[in-house]
Image: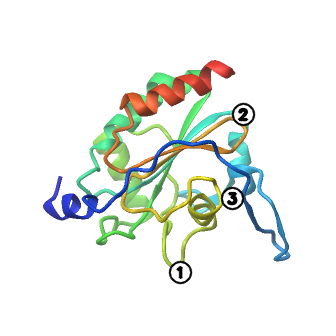
Amino acid sequence: MHLLDRAILALVVVVGTTAATEGTHADSSGAPHVSQGIYDFSVRAADGTERSLADFRGKTVLVVNTASRCGFTPQYASLEKLYEQYHGRGFEILAFPANNFLSQEPGTDAEIQGFCQTRFGTKFPVFAKISVRGKDIAPLYAWLTKESGFNGDIPWNFTKFLVGPNGRVVARFAPPVDPLDAKVTGQLEKLLAVK
């Protein structure tokens, strides 16, 4: 891990896991409505097409913001192992590259895809680069950080949100928590056992 990553992470508060609450956000007319969780959102795939997160309805999902030049980039390998272990049981990983922290994700969408597939053999979806904080925050991340019940700015790359089959966030994990950590797999096992 880079020294600067460590220094910044010294400031990160590990967010505990509590029950998610309903959130609200404005619909296309600007009127607020009760959110149905991540299924209300569409995101841009790496090929530029729009993808509705409703495509993942009924699955347990780990949403994670990623970067290819971060001290936590090796977590891609853990993410892939987690995906291989649980995908057959209704689990998905949705990775969102972001360049919000010290320009640690400077590549194009095509370069990011190549990096993930060549270096880590990723089979889970790695979407188009987005912003996870600031004035240009993507709507999905605005909801995750302000209305999901696990509120708070994204402190760094590889912040993880575990989403139940109903589309609601059930846990949030700080960047240092490896995807294969028992904190993550324990919650994941509970969600998959309910199915």
Give the mark nearer the N terminus: 3 vs 2.
3
Q: At 49% from the left edge and 66% from the top edge, which residue is drawn?
A: 132
- Contact between marks 3 and 2 (CB within 8 A): the answer is no
> Considering only vertical position in the picture, is 132 above or below 150?
below
Q: Give the residue pinned by disc 1.
A: 135
Whole-percent x, y for residue 121 in the image? 36, 37
Q: Residue furthest left?
A: 3
Q: At 62% from the left edge and 53% from the top edge, which residue is drawn?
A: 149
Looking at the picture, tell me which residue is in the foreground, 129 or 158.
158
How far apart marks 3 and 2 lie (CA) works out to: 16 Å
Give the mark nearer the N terminus: 1 vs 2.
2
Give the mark nearer the N terminus: 3 vs 1.
3
Say which mark, if any, is on residue 58: 2
Residue 49 in view, yes or no: no
Element assignment for label 3:
strand
Whole-percent x, y for residue 150 in the image? 56, 53
Whole-percent x, y for residue 125 in the image? 52, 45
> Considering only vertical position in the picture, is 118 above or below 89?
below
- Amino acid identity at mark 3: Ser
Say which mark, if any, is on residue 42: 3
